[in-house]
Image (cartoon, rainbow, N blue to C red):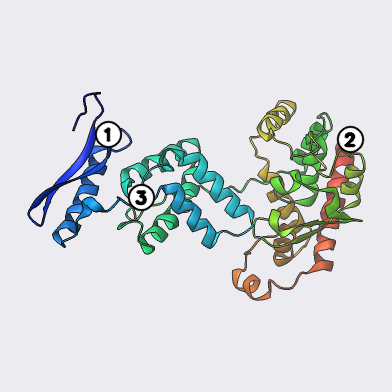
């Protein structure tokens, strides 16, 4: 129905106790014809059961409303849930203010496809974040059908297995020496500790006690506090960092550094002879290097703070054992090895 001003709205007409009744559904634009048709069919079903829907407001919950309620019941203070929030807010922004009943399967597929164009991982993470939200919405009666139900998840990205050679690692370290704060010391700590990029970037002076760095549970991927022994070379790197607030690598004093992409491009320009590699390869190289030095797989898993390991059965049963002395020995062996190849490259 069009008004004198040109605005178009949807409504549904029905009879109740012999009287003709009309129920407004909403304006065209925010509401599509297909969405209005779905709403009308639901209302007419209630009319058939004798309900005067004209007297009842149309109950609506936006996707964002339901998502927030879902998080209230499931969210934990871990990096995983921060990523869920970020992925949905970024890649599903176009549907957040929509009535959740109006969201259709094709729209979810389009959002996932668009995210996948940026990276296969982004598309898969968005789908993995949205599917349980809509499933929970069905369980709670917000919608009748999960629009993700008949969608296949995007294929998992092909696992990378690039491990840097000693020569490549030495060349990278030498190139890092040519870079400035915060990335020069930050990248060296990535090599020496084998920890995740975001965990190292947000490293806090208060987390360091002597030669042990403790990452609080709220900053780890699996939500478990994690202790990392610091090799003397790592301590030497940290001692050269100027203190500017609690965050070690902050340029503002209040937030962790950003701009890893730009820093990696700078590093690539300094090492044009190297094959393509990623920053995450530093973590994989540390793990492989410790294995080559005789460190046991279950100990390496604990150094990396992985939830599961090569021998998943063993790790699931004995994960509570911290292997503190073995972990320290593994980190020290790796640090000694890095020191050795750096000295060899300088000669």
Residue highlighted by disc 1: 28
For the point 63% across and 53% down, which residue is it?
79
Label 1: how many Cα within 10 Å (few below 14, some 14–19, many 20+): some
User: Residue reaching furthest top?
Assistant: 5
Where residue 60 is drawn, which disc sits there? 3
Indicate the secondary structure of the residue bearing disc 2. helix
> At x 76% / y 69%, what residue is drawn?
322
Neighbour tally class for label 2: few under 14, some 14-19, many 20 plus, Cα within 10 Å: few
- Residue wearing tag 2: 346
Position of residue 132 relative to residue 35, above or below, is below
- Rounded to the nearest whole Å, what is the CA distance between mark 2 and mark 3? 67 Å
Residue 286 position within the rendered picture, expressed as x and y whole percent measured from the top left:
74, 51
Residue at horizontal 66 percent and vertical 45 percent from the top: 280
Q: Position of residue 211 (x, y in %)?
A: 90, 56
Mark earlier in primary sequence (3, 1)? 1
Q: Which mark's residue is nearer the viewer, 2 or 3?
A: 3
The numbered dot on residue 74 is: none
Q: Quadrant of the C terminus?
A: top right
Q: Position of residue 230 (x, y in %)?
A: 86, 54
Residue 229: x and y in percent read 84, 57
Q: Mark 1 or mark 2: which comes first in sequence?
A: 1
Mark 1: secondary structure: loop
Above or below residue 116? Residue 72 is: below
């Amino acid at each position: 129905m069009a008004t004198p001003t040109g605005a178009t709205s949807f409504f549904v007409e029905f009879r109740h106790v012999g009287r003709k009744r009309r129920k407004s559904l909403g304006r065209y634009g925010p509401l599509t014809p297909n969405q209005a048709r779905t709403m009308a069919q639901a209302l007419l079903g209630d009319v058939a059961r004798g309900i005067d829907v004209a007297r009842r407001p149309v109950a609506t919950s936006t996707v964002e409303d339901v998502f927030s309620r879902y998080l209230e019941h499931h969210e934990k203070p871990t990096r995983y849930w921060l990523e869920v929030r970020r992925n949905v807010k970024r890649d599903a922004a176009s549907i957040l203010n929509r009535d959740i009943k109006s969201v259709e399967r094709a729209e979810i597929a389009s959002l996932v496809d668009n995210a996948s164009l940026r990276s296969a991982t982004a598309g898969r993470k968005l789908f993995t974040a949205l599917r349980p939200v809509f499933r929970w919405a069905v369980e709670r009666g917000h919608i009748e059908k999960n629009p993700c139900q008949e969608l296949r998840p995007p294929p998992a990205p092909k696992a990378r297995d690039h491990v840097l050679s000693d020569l490549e690692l030495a060349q990278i370290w030498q190139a890092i020496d040519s870079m400035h704060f915060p990335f020069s010391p930050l990248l060296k700590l990535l090599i020496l500790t084998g920890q995740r990029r975001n965990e190292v970037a947000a490293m806090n002076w208060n987390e360091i006690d002597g030669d042990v760095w403790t990452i609080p549970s709220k900053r780890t991927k699996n939500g478990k506090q994690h202790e990392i022994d610091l090799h003397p070379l790592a301590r030497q790197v940290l001692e050269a960092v100027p203190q500017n607030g609690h965050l070690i690598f902050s340029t503002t004093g209040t937030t962790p550094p950003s701009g890893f992409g730009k820093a990696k491009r700078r590093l690539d320009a300094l090492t044009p002879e190297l094959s393509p590699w990623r920053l995450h390869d530093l973590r994989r190289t540390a793990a492989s290097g410790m294995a080559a030095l005789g460190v046991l797989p279950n100990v390496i898993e604990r150094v990396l703070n992985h939830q599961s390991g090569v021998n998943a059965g063993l790790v699931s049963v004995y994960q509570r054992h911290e292997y503190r002395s073995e972990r320290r020995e593994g980190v020290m062996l790796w640090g000694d090895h890095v020191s050795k190849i750096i000295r060899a490259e300088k000669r």
